[in-house]
Amino acid sequence: MSNFNEMDKIVLTALGAGTNEVTRLESMGISTKKAIAAIGSAQTLSAMVGMETTVATNIFAWASIDLEADNETNTQETATAYTPMAIPFALESLDFYMNLIKAAQENDEINEAQVGSVSEIHARLDERELDTNEVYNFARSFSIMLEPALNKVYGNEGISTEAEQLLGITEAFFKKAIEMFHGFGRARIMYAYMLCMQKRFQETIEIVTPALTLPEGGQDWMTAAYWYLTAKASIGDTYAEASQVYHVFKEHAVVGSR
């Protein structure tokens, strides 16, 4: 049975994987970033290992992004960043969202396991008295549901107009949650994941940097630091502050800890 190298184990742990989950992957012959990426989706990874959806999403995104790329490749990737559809924040009817989702489903751009949560969270949203957490929950649910579309975007594939609209809506809800609570670390972290998958690395850095004020070494801080370092590496900036964050990240990422 082959095993992950020590650096990969550090990152997997920092992203929320437990020792048992890492061992389970290794027992299946999955012991490299490439092997994780070959699984095809965070949804499948979660089902195979019994892993929390958010943890699986972060790990699959990490496995799909090549941090070893040279600066020339990174420059090319930055140049092909996705241009989002600008959509202002508005709480629409459930039917409005479901019609877009149904159309995107026909193009294999939707994680169908997440569609039910959209209905549940929408029922709790009240435009007259918006709750910051529910605004975030709605955006988070959309970002996980749109994982197949984000994978296409990262691979420089085209997506449907409906998927573009849904990505724009998701971004509007993340921005609203952060506007309502500037220090909303988890909203910044999930928004950073979505931006990174669109190769919008400079925006990722701007969004996630404030989350580095979270308790240092905690799981939220480690996830924020991961997306920050991923974006920095992707634009070829591994100096100064990025180097300091990396050393703190490495110091706290003890293999086998949670």
Image (cartoon, rainbow, N blue to C red):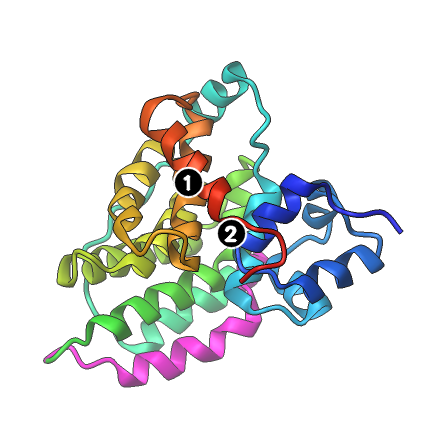
Earlier sequence position, callout 2 versus callout 1: 2
Report which quarter residue 73 is drawn in.
top right
| Residue stretch rendered in magenta on the structure | 105-128
- Residue nearer the viewer, 168 or 21: 21
Visible residue check, residue 199: no
Query: Could you say which is closer to the camera, residue 41 or residue 160?
Result: 41
Residue 94 falls inside the magenta stretch: no
Residue at 72 percent of width and 41 percent of height: 5
Q: Is residue 122 magenta?
A: yes
Considering every residue shown, the one lying at the far top of the view is 72
Residues marked 2 and 1 touching at CB (< 8 Å): no
> Distance from label 2 to label 1 (Cα)?
33 Å
Q: Secondary structure at mark 2?
A: helix
Judged left or right of residue 170, residue 17 is: right
Image coordinates of residue 50 in percent, x first then y, are 67, 72
From the viewer's side, name the closer residue of 92 and 28.
Answer: 28
Disc 2 marks which residue? Answer: 149
